[in-house]
Image (tube, rainbow, N blue to C red):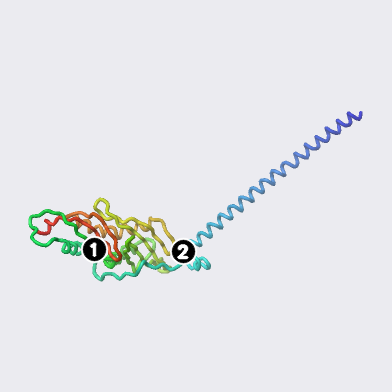
Amino acid sequence: MRIEDSQIFSEQTKAMAREIEKEIRPVKIKRGKFLGCGSCFFTCLIILLAVFIFGLWAAAKTGLWGIPFFSDWFYKTPEPLHWVSPAGEKFSPEKILSDGVKESLPRGNIAGQSVKIPVNLTITEGELTELLRAAENGLNNNNFGVKFSGSQIAVSEEALELFTKAVIKGERETFLTVRVIPEVREKKIELHLLDVKLGDLELPALLGNYLVKNFLEGRLNELSEKNSSFGEITAINLKDGKMIINTKLNIEVFKK
């Protein structure tokens, strides 16, 4: 009898344990789900907070908004490589070509000759600045309400720097800086974009490419078109304050 009682008690104990386990298991699962949802919530909150802080940082870097703490720490009013005064006369590819030819033609009688000689066409940063300011009306005819003024181009041995003041919707003011390297490809001048900044914030190349391709590269290639009748552009060199375009011209065209 004692053995039977013991077996019965054991079976009852196991049955009770199974019932208790059934009751406890859903509680554990529910608790796990709650902890999982809480973890996701805090992760999303941290991500949103990081995006918000990044947005404040980016807005402050543009200089368009004065944001407490962020503007003081992360924004410094941009300045150009150096200040450039415009040349004071309209940019003229014909004049640049004519001046380069006069300086490069050999002396003496060259009638009947058909020899290509090197001719260097020099464009000062003042002339480039005059060219860019002449394009401001075209630049200001945009759908974004952005007006540019005081544009200039400074020339160093590394790059051309385009610097201009930008006023958005007539209210917020900042500065745009674009750096490019001129290159010769297929006998034409191409401007390779290095970087573009709005205020202190570096922007995607799309905006800089739009400005460079539409309002500067085309005007410079007027020299290529004028030059193509007489020869070809071979290289471009940058010196402080000037851009020198190396060409080879057929002198027979100029003297017969």
Work out which quarter of the rendered image holds the N terminus and state it: top right
Q: Position of residue 7 (x, y in %)?
A: 86, 30
Quarter assignment of residue 149: bottom left
Work out which quarter of the rendered image holds the C terminus and state it: bottom left
Q: Report the residue at 78% width, 38% height from top.
A: 19
Residue indicated by mark 1:
122
Q: Amino acid at mark 2?
A: Lys
Q: Report the residue at 23% width, 54% height from top.
A: 234
Q: Which mark is residue 214?
A: none
Q: Position of residue 157 (x, y in %)?
A: 32, 61
Q: Is disc 1 surrounded by few (<14), some (14 to 19) or many (20+) residues within 10 Å?
A: some
In the foreground, 200 or 165: 200
Of the numbered discs 1 and 2, the one sitting upstream in the chain is: 2
Quarter assignment of residue 210: bottom left
Residue indicated by mark 2:
61
Q: Amino acid at mark 1?
A: Thr
Q: Report the residue at 27% width, 57% height from top.
A: 236
Q: Position of residue 162 (x, y in %)?
A: 34, 63
Query: Viewed as shown, does residue 74 lie left or right of 247?
Result: right
